[in-house]
Amino acid sequence: MLAAVTGTEPEIGPAVRGVSYLIEGVPDEELRRDLAAIRDELHCTAVMVIGADVEHLDRAAQIVVDAGLDVWIRPNLPDRPVAEMLSRLADLATAAERLRADHPDRVTLLVGSEFSHTAPGIVPGSWSYLRLLIILRARRLLRARITRRLDELLARAHAVAARAFHGPIGYSAAGWEEVDWRRFDLVGVALYRSGTDHAGYARRVRELVGSHDKPVVVTEFGCGAFAGADRRGAGSFRIVNWFADPPVVRDGHPREESVQARYLGDLIDLYAASGVAGCFAFTFAMRSYLRSDDPRQDLDRAGFGLVAVAVADERAPWVAKEAFHTVAERYRALDPAPADRQDC
């Protein structure tokens, strides 16, 4: 529970041990089945549900709580007009408050994620991926503009959410975004490690924890399952030629699940040693990144799923990857009393 760690430093490790879950296209029964594995096998205490539809998010959040897990609700509306985004956020906040009233301290609401590229108008560009490329190439030149316009949007989003929702409110910031965290109840950052400067990444984590009097939660971290994915981090998906029909994985990126597993295990260890209050591995499954025996069609290795969804395999809806087992091992070790916990 976020409320249990607010203003304190975890004694053992992240009190919020989570995984994100992309709900689009997932039937309720499939979600229930997956949550059983997330709770009993992955040893999570929380799930971050991510989606666009308010009704679907509301229903998924209820299912998560019913499964004995805390829920973090995160709307995802890239490229939609800001007015529409805020309108849906208002509806979502109302729904989230109804759930929170029935389950105090079990529900956290995020107003969104990485607005600098997901929301139009902060930087030039007609769609999210184009804006992301512009940011990556000209971040220093755009820094002041991004910070000013992002702050304006975050102020509006927080005000909309707080009018209806009275539990913890947060935001999932991109690693480059400068956020005034005073209006939020937690510091939430998607903190992917890339390159080879592991010491620099560790310093960044410690500085985040040390410079805020609020809980720091890593809202996303992960990489692909191929040789060199640990150096690419959030850019793992770029080994795919998305303009081909169908998309194909470029040559030179052999599948290597141990890379993803080691990356996630190392970062969870770092968070536990650095006073991070919570972390959400990204992500449980990426159903649009299917696994295939054909290396050029094996999109799964470019994705971030802890489980692989196979092409046209109705016998096994998903298969746990090495990363799943590594995260499960770390989360179980960080649980202060796994045998006694009846409810997360």
Image (cartoon, rainbow, N blue to C red):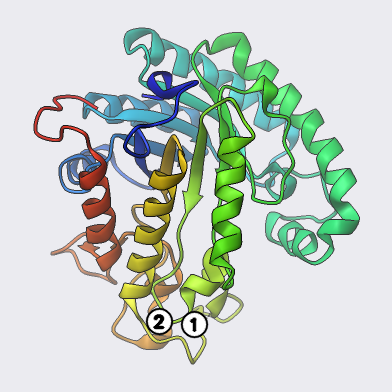
Type of amino acid under label 2: Gln
Question: As rendered, which of 63 and 192 lies closer to the eye?
Answer: 192
| Circle 2: element type | helix
Residue denoted by label 2: 297
Task: Please indicate whether residue 190 sits to the left or right of residue 142 in the image.
Answer: left
Residue at (31, 74) in percent of width and height: 258
Task: Please indicate whether residue 343 sits to the left or right of residue 254 in the image.
Answer: left
Residue 253 percent location from the top left of the image: 46, 86
Residue 3 percent location from the top left of the image: 42, 18
Q: Which mark is on residue 248?
A: 1
Q: Would you identify the image quadrant in which residue 244 lies?
A: bottom right
Question: As rendered, which of 61 and 246 lies closer to the eye?
Answer: 61
Alpha carbon of mark 1 to alpha carbon of mark 2: how far? 5 Å
Q: Earlier in the sequence, mark 1 or mark 2?
A: 1
Evaluate whether residue 199 shows in this view. yes
How many labels, in total? Answer: 2
Question: As rendered, which of 294 and 203 lies closer to the eye?
Answer: 203
User: Which residue reaches farthest bottom?
Assistant: 251
Q: CB under 8 Å between callouts 1 and 2?
A: yes
